[in-house]
Amino acid sequence: MGIEILGLPMMYYIAMLAKVLVAFVFVLLTVAYATYAERKIIGHMQVRLGPMRTGWHGLLQPIADGVKLFFKEEIIPSQASTFAFLIAPLIALIPAFITFAVIPFGGTIEIMGYKIPMQVAAYYDTTAGQVFDVNVGVLYILAMSSLGVYGIVLAGWASNSKYSLMGGLRASAQMISYELSAGLSIIAVFMLSGTLSLTKIVELQSGMGGFEWYVFKQPLAAFMFFICALAEINRTPFDLPEAETELVSGFCTEYSSMKYAMFFMAEYANMVTVCALTTTLFLGGWNGPFAVAVPLLGPVYFVAKVYFLMFFCMWIRATVPRYRYDQLMHLGWKVFLPLALVNIVVTGIIGYFI
Amino acid sequence: METLFFAIVSLVAIISAILVITCKNPINSALSLIMTFFCLATYYVMLDAPFMAAVQVMVYAGAIMVLIVFTIMLLNIRVNATQKHSHRILLGSIIGFFTLINTIVLLVKSQAAKPVGPFTGDMIRNIGHSELIGREMFTTFLLPFEITSILLLVAIVGSVILAKKNI
């Protein structure tokens, strides 16, 4: 226990390593099985069976898909800008994964007198006896999501193909527009919480038996944030950048094998992150009945809420048709942006009088 | 630990800054510039200014660089077409040299390394960086803030007039 490495206790390194592994494996497994779940859920909604052949009810389908993509031939177009072409999938994938670092997935557990906050980017300072986390967590997430644009823009440009360029341009215009509305809609949450730290935001929602969620106080903000986030990560009904009927497959037309898989992983990882963020900001994070008394219940509630929201995304995909491009821009700039501003003003006025 | 980290970040910052001016392909230069901005954001974190770091990434790496990448993409500049003039290099080196002298003098002579005033490191750590900035911006510096917003409004109106042919 007393061993120190570079001025930090041994438990710090063990806890950090464990948390990084748990969060990373959780996101990876969710990403892999989200593809399976999506095909199954949409299949059943359309009165089909979905994948059935690989394993029991097709449970091994993600592994089979992975192996297939892994062993496919890798093609780099001869007119492509090689460096940008190779690095684009990585730029798309990495922000999608590291965003998860600031999301608290549980309360604080105590092992041998050392408190471990269940959030990757948080630690327990033994000298101060206090848990510290990233105090600008939400800004960090907004910053990382603004970096995700590059992967798609570069992929579209570097492929040197019409469809890819069109897809890339559409995607970047869409992501930049909706980033604004998404950012503005969560400002209303900060006005209630008074902090940018995600841990504190979750703690503030723990009242009323773990049901004092911000979605009840800010229903409009929650709705707008979720829709804008869907648009920002190019999910249906806003998946114009990869509209198969118009653009073949958009920015990833020229990609093959593992690089194509990386784009897909980035898309699903973004979905996990957005659902986790919506859970944290509006659905009380890991809060729920008895979550404070039994710390291990926290992650269970958190995962259940995230999976419910992901199911909701898939449900939307099965029911809502794709938007037209001008409708999409109209919705973003002329509906959501003014609504978000009005929401901020109304929250401010009500907050001043209460 | 912190010094080692600083050294690594500085190495990445310097290498990517050199790549910005040596890359043939403008997109690769832009990517290196993003990397440099990212390293600058890391410095802000190390200086107990997390809000500045997040804003640095959001505004510079996330917004301004997207514009630059857009321009490069739409003009479709594949390989750097500009010719190299020796007098430009000379002018650039003279400006760079004077900037270096300026920075050194600033660091040695002024209080840049050890700032004085009411905002100490402990105070920033206790109250919170973003809260301090917000409070100062909306109380002491309210008038400059409002003037900046009018300036931005003028810029938006101007861009709309330039973009629309018939209003």
Image: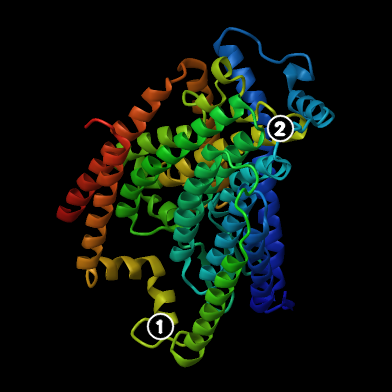
Tell me if residue A274 can be seen: yes
Mark 1 highlights which residue? B120
Q: Chain of mark 2?
A: A
Query: Residue extending furthest left?
Result: A353
Decide if residue A14 is on the left or right side of residue B53: right
- Rounded to the nearest whole Å, what is the CA distance between mark 1 and mark 2? 49 Å
The one nearer the camera, A334 or A67, is: A334
Mark 2 highlights which residue? A261
List x then y, in percent, for residue A186.
Answer: 37, 46
Q: Residue at x 40, y 50 (%)?
A: A206
Q: Using the image, determine if residue B114 lies above or below residue A2.
A: below
Disc number lying in front (1 or 2): 2
Q: Secondary structure at mark 1?
A: loop
Query: Residue extending furthest bottom?
Result: B109
List x then y, in percent, for residue A133.
Answer: 52, 63
List x then y, in percent, for residue A9.
Answer: 68, 74
Q: Secondary structure at mark 2?
A: helix
- Which amino acid, mark 2? Ala
Tell me if residue A309 can be seen: no
- Which amino acid, mark 1? Thr
Q: Which mark is residue B72?
A: none
